[in-house]
Structure formats: C-alpha cells, structure tokens
Amino acid sequence: MALAKVLQKINEDFAGALPYWQQHFDQWIFAHNDTQGLPPDVLSLLLELTTQHSPLEASHWGRTELLREFKQLSLSDKGSLLGPAPGLRDVVDLL
C-alpha cells in the first residue's frame, strides 16, 4: 500500500462525500484489504477527520469487519453479490 496514495484517496473520497451525503450518515468508513493493518498515518488521518467533522465518525473496515457484515446478509443477498454457486457441470468443464 502506497501511503501517499491512500492518504490522498481518503481525503478525496471523504471530501467528495460530504456535500452530498453528510446529512444522511453519521459514520464514514474507509474499506481496505490490507492484511497487515493500516499504517499509523492513515489512522491519524481518520482521527483528524473525526475531530474536524464531529459528530461524524471516520473509521475503517478491513477483512474482519467486511466478513462480519457479509455473514449477516441473507442467502439471496449473498447470491446477488457472488453470483450462482458452481454446479457439477461447471466443475466438469474445468477439467
């Protein structure tokens, strides 16, 4: 993860969301796939955004949080996200 790019993305996405959505949410979440955890500079930026825009909270979700949310979805919603499960024919076609 390139730190400068991540910080820029957070700043741009957050600033882009505020004019249109601030009245509709109280939490802004930066979703990421960094398995090592976020660098201190990213966490510091999220805390700074929270302080500047209180009561709006800027936080982050990684694999654990996203998986927790996914597990709460109905089977129908999971299917919408993942598509149909492969059948026997699909598996045979792979061989």
Image (cartoon, helix red, strand yellow):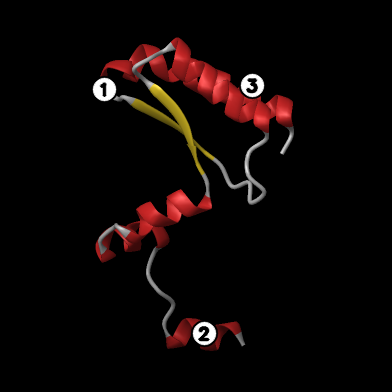
Left or right for 24, reference 68: left
Residue located 66% across and 31% down the image = 40
Quarter in which the N terminus is drawn:
top right
Q: From the image, tell me which residue sits under label 2.
A: 91
- Return the mark for residue 24: 1
Q: Secondary structure at mark 1?
A: helix
CA neighbours of label 2 inside 10 A, class few (<14), some (14 to 19), many (20+): few
Q: Secondary structure at mark 2?
A: helix
Q: Secondary structure at mark 3?
A: helix
Measured in 3D between alpha carbons, the distance from the residue under mark 3 to the one under mark 1, in whole angstroms, is 24 Å
Residue 31: where, in percent of width, then height? 50, 39
Residue type of the residue flagged with mark 2: Val
Where 70 sits versus 2, above or below?
below
Left or right for 92, reference 54: right
Q: Is residue 6 visible?
A: no
Q: Earlier in the sequence, mark 1 or mark 2?
A: 1
Q: Earlier in the sequence, mark 3 or mark 2?
A: 3
Q: Earlier in the sequence, mark 3 or mark 1?
A: 3
Residue located 46% across and 10% down the image = 52
Left or right for 92, reference 84: right
CA neighbours of label 1 inside 10 A, class few (<14), some (14 to 19), many (20+): few
> Closer to the observer: label 1 or label 2?
1
Q: Is residue 42 visible?
A: yes
Measured in 3D between alpha carbons, the distance from the residue under mark 1 to the one under mark 2, in whole angstroms, is 45 Å
CA neighbours of label 3 inside 10 A, class few (<14), some (14 to 19), many (20+): few
Residue type of the residue flagged with mark 1: His
Residue 9: where, in percent of width, then height? 60, 25
Q: From the image, tell me which residue sits under label 3.
A: 8
Residue located 25% across and 61% down the image = 74
Left or right for 88, reference 11: left
